[in-house]
Image (cartoon, grey):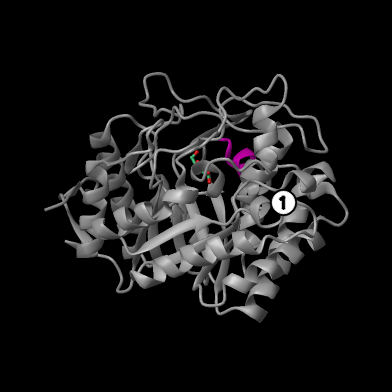
Amino acid sequence: MFHFPDGFLWGASTAAHQIEGNNVASDFWAIEHAEGSVLPERSGDACDSYHRWREDLALLRAAGLNSYRFSIEWSRIEPARGEISRAQLAHYRAMIDGCLEVGVAPIVTLHHFTSPQWFAAAGGWLAPDAVDTFARFVETACAVLDDVEWVCTFNEPNMLAMLTALLGGGSEPVELVAGALPPPDPTIGDALIEAHHRARGILRERTQARVGWTIANQNFQAEPGAEAVAEEWGWSREDRFIDAAADDDFIGVQAYTRVRIGREGALPIPPGAATTLTGWEYFPAAVGLAARHTARRLPDTPIMVTENGIATGDDEERIRYTAGALSSLADAIGDGVDVRGYLHWSLLDNYEWGSYGPTFGLVAVDRESFERRPKPSLSWLGQVARQNGFARDDAGRQADIK
Ligand code: BGC
């Protein structure tokens, strides 16, 4: 039996735009509805979790999980520049209270990919006052965060800077590279790093929170002879964002797969390799390797796994993947990596940024009635949480939950 450290957080993660529904003032909503949009599906009602969050929290709690990561939606709180909705702030405060009342630690993300439309229209992260504007939002949000222990400023700033470029908001032309997204727009990257540091200062002044941000860890693996290419590849896409967390209270590790790097850059997934519904290589060791990589760069910063999971229609495969992932994480912890929690992506089958196809959830959601149907993987993970550990076979690569 491998035991995780005392006080380990076990939970699931979500993001406002992917589950709430009708985030009509967000920039992504506008992208979904733009003429000729490249996105196959719109978010619409999503999981209607804006109204059903109590039910979602109850499912998570009943399974045995002790933490819930969710994001607050800037475009709801500030639908027009400078106009703050007290009712929306109260909504998120109610969610935080709802968690605390049932003994679930709320882990709150302030920005999970979406911004208000007015912010995007004014130039987004490239606008000269972008950091000040975000800092004012953070000050506003502090009103409901005073007793929240864990706050993530940005979700995956590295991915955000890539997506913004991809979706046409960047300062540089976008060139798609085999098997990987284009590099983050460096100017947007700079703005996000500055915004994160400003937000961290504000949160430390006004709340009790431990502050960090969460990074998309892509496990760039160099083929022989491509070490220098991989190093450079990883710097702009990932490592500079990890290093920017050097003075944070924790860093969020988010890992799903790996990307092999050859002399010319990212290599396609090898023919015959198992893939998931997102087309990524099935690679359960991703999270353990990502935690090790992060700890090598930031040896003194505690790690929280803020996302890890698999898009699959086969829940047995989800359990197998997660068991492998936890095994790799246990190995990293065994080797001294300071990991404080594991939050599975995702609680619900949700809107996967353009499509409802890739199902990452521990809970299925009926697209019309919004009925929640917990999958076996939810009780499986809940059982691991209750035991704060799991039994492993001799190879240590597969978990066997009793
Ligand atoms: C994001 C999530 C997303 C997940 C799976 C992460 O990059 O934070 O919003 O749904 O990966 O693609």
Residue drawn 69% across and 66% down?
Answer: 138
Q: Is residue 149 above or below residue 78?
A: below
How far across and down, in percent of the image, does residue 206 sit?
Answer: 65, 79
How far across and down, in percent of the image, does residue 185 sit?
Answer: 75, 42
**What range of the chain is rendered magenta?**
225-231
Residue drawn 60% across and 63% down?
Answer: 89
**Residue 45, visible in the rendered structure:** yes
Tag 1: Cα neighbours inside 10 Å, few (<14), some, or many (≥20)?
A: many
- Out of 36 and 276, give the one closest to the viewer: 36
Q: How would you classify the magenta stretch by its main secondary structure?
A: helix
Residue position marked by numbered label 1 in the rendering = 79
**Residue 183, visible in the rendered structure:** no
* Outermost left residue: 402
- Residue 393 relative to residue 141: left or right: left
- Out of 362 and 5, give the one closest to the viewer: 362
- Out of 144 and 326, give the one closest to the viewer: 144
